[in-house]
Image (tube, rainbow, N blue to C red):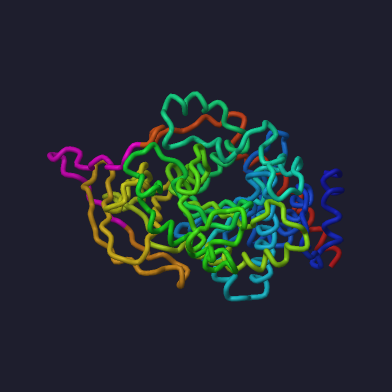
Amino acid sequence: MSSLLLFLLPLLVLGRAFALEFRYHDNREIKQYLVQISSSNQDITHLYSIGQSVRGQQLWALALGLSPRRHTVGIPEFKYVANMHGNEVLGRVLLLHLIDDLVRGYRGNETWSLQLLKSTRIHFLPTMNPDGFDAADTDCVYSRGRYNDNGVDLNRNFPDAFAGLRRTRQEEVQLEKEVRAVIGWLRAESFVLSANLHGGALVASYPYDNSNGGSEMVGGASMAPDNDVFVHLAKVYSHNHATMHQGNVCSDSPPFPDGVTNGYQWYPLAGGMQDFNYVWSQCLELTLEVSCCKFPSVDQLPALWAENRKSLLAFIQQVHLGVKGRVFDGSGVPVQDAVVEVKGRRNMCPFKTDQHGEYYRLLLPGNYSFTVTYPGHEVLTETLSVPYGPDGYSAMKHDFLLRRAAATTGDVSAPPTAANPTPPCNYTPRLEGGGATTGPSWAGLSAGLGVVAALRSLIG
């Protein structure tokens, strides 16, 4: 405990006067800041590690909300991930200042922060590639530090829905520790909406990033079944940004109408994180390129924060699009793995209820036909009129109540009609040597935070 106290005692001196500077904090300083903000705000924050980097650095994540340590039924899970490429660094700064902004707003009883934290559980991963950051130089263009310590591009290392099954099985054992940690994170939490922050351009990019030349190809773009929602989400970010919506800000990038692009139409890539989130985790994710320079100079940071702040907050609010609710069986018990399909949206892997019996479907306002299937129950089809939810910080709430199938009719729960990706929807990569480690990592840190709180109370 003495070594832990030596680490934590400087934070006591900072106390409530701690101010987050506009500069690049190294990995140790990020940890210190997250510990400090968590120890001072234990009612709305939860600090945990999702795993480790190749060199053994913890991948620290911070959750913000009224129930920060665990999921609450009806409260959607949102995440921001930064610094996936170690030399693309502005995202680290933006997420630290966004955490600081939300906490200060909540403590100051500011309506915008109160509404977000009451309605949403927000997770922040300031650096997915701390090893790469340690190796990075400050060049605007070149890629030193882009890769992890094994020399692997983490945004090309996820299982790919468009790759052949044989290739995926061959590559499964080569998933990097950081990628395994994120996959474990996605299994532990039912994320609804997400964005990963990059640098080197100014554009909001949306799935798909890859294609195998099938029906998803439309006019040079690889279009997801929820393409209308993705385009809306991308425009929410770009149009709330000071300049992104102009589409031609960076001199070395092609023009992007409205500041948005389909990932594949910009350039195809296999093994991307946003496609994995969408296909296998039911989480709609964008890739946000937030600066023309990969490593902007320190004097630009205040202006870049000001340009992105409104967009970052508006994007979180979009987690309240569409419909949410639970599926109950014939006995009134919420059920896991009930398939909740929306007519006209042929998802590769059908959206299913989680362990709480919950579903979330991000949809634009309109009328939609839902079909719910669950073994031993009649197929349920209902048409819902969906309003715009973000302004009220809540998606439309609708529960589906199933009826048991008559014994003489056999199993009338039809199989899902989704297109089949490779690997299949029940594919679960082995995560030995990686994956979420929230329990052990949090347990040790939690004890330290308790010491900080107790000592702070003694010194006033």
Nearer the observer, 194 or 205: 205
How far across and how far down the image is residue 307, in percent? Answer: 63, 67
The outermost residue toward the left is: 408
Q: Is residue 284 left or right of residue 446?
A: left
- Taking the spot 54% from the left edge, 51% from the top edge, the residue there is 287
**249 versus 51 height, above or below:** below
The image quadrant that residue 280 belongs to is: top left
- Taking the spot 39% from the left edge, 33% from the top edge, the residue there is 422
Looking at the rendering, in which quadrant would you find the N terminus?
top right
Is most of the magenta stretch helix, strand or loop?
loop
How far across and how far down the image is residue 312, in percent? Answer: 58, 63
- Taking the spot 69% from the left edge, 44% from the top edge, the residue there is 142
How far across and how far down the image is residue 318, in percent? Answer: 48, 63
- Segment tinted magenta in the rendering: 400-420
**98 versus 420 height, above or below:** below
Q: Is residue 61 left or right of residue 212?
A: right
